[in-house]
Image (cartoon, rainbow, N blue to C red):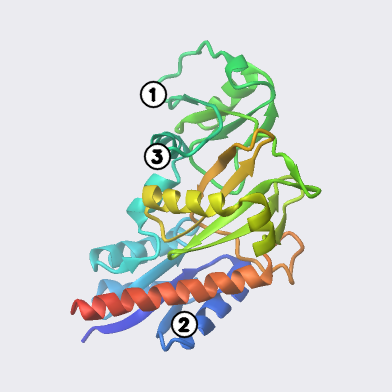
Amino acid sequence: MTREIDFGIAWEWEHDGDFIDRLVEACRARTIETCVVDPRNCAELTQAVLRDELVFTTFFDRASDTNRDFLPLAGGLVQDHAFFINHPADVEKAINKAAMHLEFIMHGISVPYTIILPVFEKDPTDRIIKLDTVGIPFIVKPAHGGGGVGVLVGARTLSEVMAARQDFQDDQILIQENIVPRIIEGKRAWFRVYYIGGAVTICWWDPEAHIYGKVTPEESARWGLTELERMARVIHSIAKLNFFSTEIAITESLRFVSVDYVNDQCDMRLKSKAPDAVPDEVVGFVCEQLAAFVERSLAQKRAAGIA
């Protein structure tokens, strides 16, 4: 007989523990049954899923992108038609910066001026690139990858672009305008905006110091930051992810620019544990909203006679 559990949560990053504990507690308060999957029990639970002994009605995957041991579990749950917080097919599309760049433009979201170069393995020819169209200095980054891997800030020469194409031969390369944010009340107008199952919360984010700060309702009203929420909702309609963050900057000309399109694996370390981490109240809010979203999803499935 198959055992069905409301919510499976897979994680493997050593710094995720506090976040997972808070999420489990938020679910417990809503009588949502959870099962936490980590490297210690991954193989056992994967076999149970593949043998149809176990199924998760809803699944939150914070592991398979960095630990291949979790891929069979995610694949089995796709076959079981489990509801993913972020479905793998949607994640695959959303993490492609080149694809998102074009989608954002089509949906009216302002993005940095960008030149997209083809995959080197498919087109190794040297190209005549007019760098003055993006301005100097500029940003060079591969279309895939996160955590700043492969991102070159302050590039100035074509040789740096070509080096990036050599380093990431199986990926497209983006050459992007360097966005300079305006200063608001002594802070860079650069924000990390979180979308969580229909809710949105906003943090100040200093891209140089890597320091977060919660945006207050007063600051939002004073500077018209509700536009950030609107943009996050449009991005959700494009990417189809239910939990993600995006970086948006405001320039001197009051242009709201999406500078880092979709991050599907949000850093949820607690600021009380690390100075460059997320404010504890924001992590708490994320957990409450994720639990509420799972609760609504379960209710909809039960009403439809699926779960």
Decide: is 35 above or below 153: below
Disc 3 residue crowd, few under 14, some 14–19, many 20+, Cα 10 Å = few
**Disc 2 and disc 1 in contact, CB within 8 angstroms:** no
Whether residue 92 appears in this view of the structure is: no
Q: Position of residue 83 (x, y in %)?
A: 31, 68
Q: Position of residue 70 (x, y in %)?
A: 42, 64
In 3D space, how far apart are the residues under numbered discs 2 and 1 (Cα atoms)? 47 Å
Question: Which mark sits nearer the N-terminus, 3 or 2?
Answer: 2
Q: Residue at x 42, y 80 (%)?
A: 35
Mark 1, residue position: 122
Q: Residue at x 63, y 38 (%)?
A: 254
Q: Nearer the viewer, residue 233 or 100?
A: 233
Q: Quadrant of residue 60?
A: bottom left
Mark 2, residue position: 27
Image side of residue 211 versus residue 134, left or right: right
**Quadrant in which the C terminus is drawn:** bottom left
Label annotation for residue 107: 3
**Quadrant in which the N terminus is drawn:** bottom left
